Image (cartoon, helix red, strand yellow):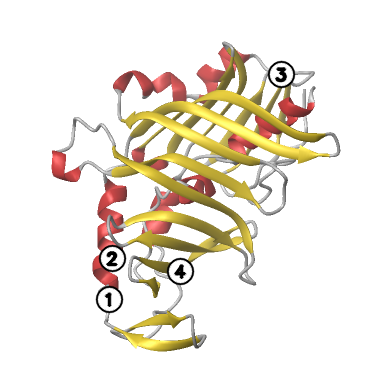
């Protein structure tokens, strides 16, 4: 298996692993970082490196606005291109693939496919209990299976899982308890705890006040170190014909994903994000149907002994 196959197959999923029961878990989560001060927000004073009082921000309204946007993403499908750039002892490298991402039931079910020149590179997915990752280019071809909260092995995002991907895409609801810090007149940062998933236990989100959309997301460990981050830009309204125009969510159509622990940087460009029915067919989320199509030679269930 080539170096790029090793990069694309495991990463694509873990840049996702993909899926999302996290939505349900995160919605129920009441744990988080306490606000900076009741009814007030800290504003950074760069000249004096001090904290001064700023006009109060309505934290509840900010959380409500974010969660209303996420509620419009209970079903979602998009197609686009993903570019991977990395550096090693042989210099700089570039690779590109076509990707299809879809989820439903608020992210309980998810499907991520990666192709190049009509050839399937990887197919990952998850439901509320487990995730799966098909690697047809590996010799022999392989299917990985694991519990929802178990990281994918040998991933360039070793902490990642379905919930991590959704968080990096700004597609998870926020808990009620959030700390808000005013960074500048046009931006503020929200920080909150998440139920531990591997090393990831906390999230920091920079929000553009002009459109109230997350623009930079960092996943943090228990010590506050950044594990991975995303930059979200070029917002577009998702094509959701089943929703009134006022409820159709805005999503980023350009996303940069990177992990502190590896050399690769992903750039993803979505084309017509929305909820097209032809991209949300049942068979895309059915493990047994996919398994019959992919026919992996080797199956590794991380909850059981390896088997062939």
Q: Are marks 2 and 3 in contact (CB under 8 Å)?
A: no
* Quadrant in which the C terminus is drawn: top right
Circle 3: element type? loop
Residue 100, position as x, y percentages in the image: 47, 25
Nearest to the eye among marks 1 and 4: give it. Answer: 1
- Alpha carbon separation for disc pair 1 and 2: 8 Å
Density class for disc 4 (Cα within 10 Å; few <14, some 14-19, many ≥20) is many
Q: Earlier in the sequence, mark 2 or mark 4?
A: 2
- Residue 137 tag number: 3
Circle 4: element type? strand
Density class for disc 3 (Cα within 10 Å; few <14, some 14-19, many ≥20) is some
Residue picked out by circle 1: 57
Residue picked out by circle 2: 62
**Residue positioned 46% across, 26% down in the render:** 80
Nearest to the eye among marks 3 and 4: give it. Answer: 4
Q: In the rendered image, is residue 255 in sight?
A: yes
* Quadrant in which the N terminus is drawn: top right
- Residue 191 tag number: 4
Query: Please, is residue 4 above or below residue 231 in the view?
Result: above
Nearest to the eye among marks 2 and 3: give it. Answer: 2
Residue 45, position as x, y percentages in the image: 44, 83
Q: Earlier in the sequence, mark 3 or mark 4?
A: 3
Circle 1: element type? loop
Q: Nearest the camera: 124 or 118?
A: 118
Circle 2: element type? helix
Q: Are marks 1 and 2 in contact (CB under 8 Å)?
A: yes
Q: Earlier in the sequence, mark 1 or mark 3?
A: 1
- Alpha carbon separation for disc pair 3 and 4: 40 Å
Residue 191, position as x, y percentages in the image: 45, 69
Residue 299, position as x, y percentages in the image: 71, 26
């Amino acid at each position: 298996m080539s170096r790029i196959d090793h990069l694309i197959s495991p990463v694509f999923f873990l840049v996702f692993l993909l899926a999302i029961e996290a939505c349900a878990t995160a919605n129920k989560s009441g744990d988080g970082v306490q606000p900076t001060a009741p009814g007030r927000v800290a504003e950074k004073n760069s000249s004096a490196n001090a904290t001064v009082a700023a006009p109060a921000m309505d934290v509840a309204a900010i959380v409500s606005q974010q969660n209303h946007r996420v509620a419009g993403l209970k079903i979602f499908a998009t197609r686009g291109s993903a570019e991977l750039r990395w550096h090693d002892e042989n210099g700089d490298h570039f690779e590109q693939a076509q990707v299809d991402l879809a989820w439903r039931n608020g992210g309980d079910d998810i499907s991520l496919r990666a192709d190049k020149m009509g050839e399937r590179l990887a197919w990952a997915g998850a439901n509320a209990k487990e995730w799966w990752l098909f690697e047809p280019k590996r010799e022999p071809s392989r299917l990985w299976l694991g519990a929802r909260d178990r990281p994918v092995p040998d991933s360039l995002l070793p902490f990642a899982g379905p919930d991590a991907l959704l968080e990096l895409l700004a597609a998870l609801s926020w808990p009620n308890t959030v700390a808000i810090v005013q960074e500048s007149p046009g931006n503020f940062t929200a920080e909150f705890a998440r139920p531990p998933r591997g090393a990831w236990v906390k999230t920091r989100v920079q929000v553009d006040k002009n459109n109230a959309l997350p623009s930079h997301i960092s996943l943090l460990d228990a010590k506050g170190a950044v594990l991975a981050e995303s930059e979200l830009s070029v917002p577009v309204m998702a094509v959701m014909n089943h929703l009134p125009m006022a409820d159709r969510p805005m999503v980023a159509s350009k996303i940069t994903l990177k992990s502190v622990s590896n050399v690769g940087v992903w750039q993803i460009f979505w084309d017509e994000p929305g909820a097209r029915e032809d991209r949300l067919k049942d068979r895309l989320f059915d493990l047994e149907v996919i398994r019959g199509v992919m026919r992996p030679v080797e199956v590794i269930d991380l909850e059981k002994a390896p088997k062939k």
